[in-house]
Image (spheres, rainbow, N blue to C red):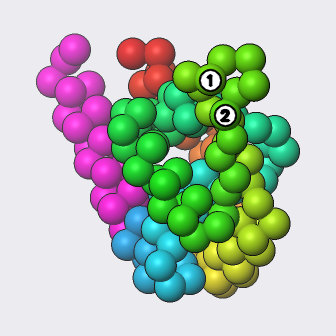
Amino acid sequence: MSEPDNALAIALLAEIFMVDQMARSRIGRVLPKGMELSHFSVLNHLAHGNAERSPAQLAQTFHVTRGAMTNTLGKLEWAGHVHIRPDWDDARRKFVSISPAGRVARDAALAALAPVIAEVLEAIGSEQVRAILPTLRDIRTQLDEG
């Protein structure tokens, strides 16, 4: 990689890291009391998928360890936001689904996030967001494959 390309790559990663940190901080401040970003992410994923997932599948989806996912799922189960049941065919496995209370919690989180997202979208502009999304998806895909 040439020196200009190296500087460009470093600048790109620095911006991505800063955006990630700032977004996490801002979102964390507006989420309902007791909800963490990881909780919202799992609830949102389960709500969109409308299907049970194993803890291992969720860990893979979110690129976290099984232990980290088990911890998150334990907190969500304790709060009544997910149901965890054994796999009837293989007792070593479990399946996770979002509960009605989890849907309510996810919807409350979305309502809290909506003004933040709308503010950013309005400041940047819909066209610019539409233009950058394919590039961000390409970066994510490249990082996922690496």
Q: What stretch is highlighted in magenta?
A: 1-22
- Viewer can see residue 119: no
Cα–Cα gap, marks 2 and 1: 6 Å
Q: Mark 2 points at which residue?
A: 86
Q: Which residue is drawn at 71% across and 66% down?
A: 102
17 and 113: which is toward the camera: 113
Tell me where residue 29 sits by quadrant.
Answer: bottom left
Magenta segment, principal secondary structure?
helix
74 to the left or right of 14 = right
Counting from the top left corner in percent of width and height, residue 103 is at 77, 66
Please, is residue 13 above or below residue 83 in the view?
Answer: above
Residue at 41%, 50% (x, y): give it.
71
Name the amino acid, label 1: Ala
Q: Which of 91 and 51 is in front in this view?
A: 91
Determine if the magenta segment contains residue 20: yes
Secondary structure under the numbered disc 2 in the rendered image: strand
Question: Residue 72 colored magenta?
Answer: no
Q: Does residue 108 appear anywhere in the picture?
A: yes
Count all numbered tags in the image, as a single digit.
2
Residue found at x 69% / y 74%: 105
Q: In this view, does 25 lie above or below 89?
A: below
Left or right, residue 81 beside residue 17: right
In depth, the one of 45 and 77 nearer the eye is 77
Say few, some or many: other residues with alpha carbon within 10 Å of mark 1 (under 14 / 14 to 19 / 20 or more). few
As helix, strand or loop, the secondary structure at mark 1 comes to loop
Q: Are marks 2 and 1 in contact (CB under 8 Å)?
A: yes
The kind of residue on which mark 2 rests is Pro
Q: Is residue 95 above or below residue 3?
A: below
Q: Name the residue under label 1.
A: 91
